[in-house]
């Protein structure tokens, strides 16, 4: 991993999506909360991350808490 193993908010978001897709919603919630925490602290890898990502992260978190994957929203 580059950056000495650092995974930013965007990385934890992808992990959360993956766990939810697999059906492990407890871990998805845990990873999404970490993504939100890192986002609030300005810790993300891509320069294109914006405040819209925070809205998406929050919506995903609510779905994961209900036992739903993000793709079920589509």
Image (cartoon, grey):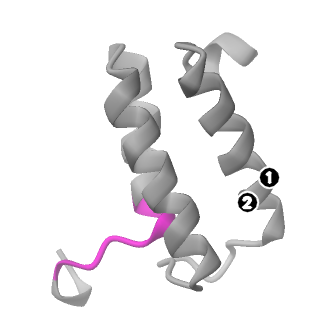
Based on the picture, tell me whether residue 10 belongs to the magenta stretch: yes
Number of residues whose C-alpha sits closer than 10 Å to that of mark 1, classed few (under 14), some (14–19) or many (20 or more): few
Q: Is residue 46 left or right of residue 72?
A: left
Q: Is residue 28 above or below residue 64?
A: below
User: Which residue appears at 53% of the width and 68% of the height?
Assistant: 37
The N terminus sits in image quarter:
bottom left
Which residue is found at the position 32% from the left and 20% from the top?
24
Where residue 21 appears, as percent x and y from the top left, is: 42, 19
In which quarter of the view is residue 6 placed?
bottom left
* Residue drawn at the location 74% of the way across and 38% of the way down: 59
Which residue is tagged 2?
A: 54
Residue 40 image position (x, y, % from top left): 63, 76
Residue 51 located left or right of residue 27: right
Percent of width and height locating residue 68 = 57, 14
From the viewer's side, name the closer residue of 51 and 63: 63
Label 2 CA crowd tier, 10 Å (few <14, some 14–19, many 20+):
some
Compared to residue 65, the image places residue 23 above or below, namely above
Q: Quadrant of the C terminus?
A: top right
Measured Cα–Cα span from mark 1 to mark 2: 4 Å
The stretch in magenta equals 5-11
Against 68, residue 17 (above or below) is: below
Please report the residue visible at 56 percent of the width from the left and 25 percent of the height from the top.
65
Q: Quadrant of residue 30?
A: top left
Dots 1, 2 in contact, CB < 8 A = yes
Residue placed under numbered mark 1 in the picture: 55
Helix, strand or loop status at disc 2? helix
Is residue 52 rendered magenta in the image? no
């Amino acid at each position: 991993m580059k950056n000495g193993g650092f995974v930013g908010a965007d990385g934890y978001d992808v992990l959360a999506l993956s766990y939810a897709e697999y059906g492990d919603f407890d871990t998805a919630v845990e990873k999404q909360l970490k993504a939100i925490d890192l986002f609030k602290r300005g810790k993300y890898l891509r320069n294109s991350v914006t405040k819209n990502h925070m809205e998406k992260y929050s919506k995903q978190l609510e779905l994961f808490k209900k036992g739903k994957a993000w793709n079920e929203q589509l």
